Amino acid sequence: GQIFANASTLLFFWFLGTGKTFLGVKIAELLLHNRSVWCPADQKNSPILMVCQTNHALDQFLEHIIQRLNLKEGTFSVS
């Protein structure tokens, strides 16, 4: 696997079954719980972009995020 990171971007690539969804959910959870640190005070919302190779991977990620954070309908959008 490989990890690429800078101040505003984190990319990680690993093989099947190595915990990419788990790690992505943990990172998103950390970002959302610490929004005041990285989201400017004058902005109510700042988007987090999640890019997946397959729709299945994105579905799994969103299902885990919704479950872990008790998100309600309308909290996020999928495009």
Image (tube, rainbow, N blue to C red):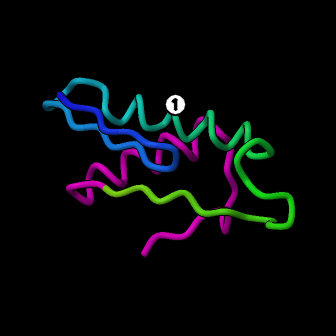
- Residue 68, x across and y down, in percent: 60, 35
Q: What residue is pinned by disc 1?
A: 26
Q: Up-down: is 57 above or below 46?
A: above
Badge 1 marks a residue whose secondary structure is: helix
Q: Position of residue 47 (x, y in %)?
A: 60, 63
- Going 74% across and 45% down the picture, which residue do you hit? 35
Residue drawn where x is 48% and y is 40% of the image = 64
Q: Quadrant of residue 39?
A: bottom right
Tally of numbered tags: 1
Outermost residue toward the front in this view: 7
- Across and down, in percent, residue 53 comes to 21, 55
Which one is nearer the viewer's eye here, 34 or 56? 34
Q: Nearer the viewer, residue 60 or 16?
A: 16
Give the magenta part as a residue range: 52-79
Instruction: Please report the residue visible at 72 percent of the width from the left and 37 percent of the height from the top.
Output: 33
Amino acid at dot 1: Lys
Compared across the picture, whether 45 is left or right of 21 comes to right
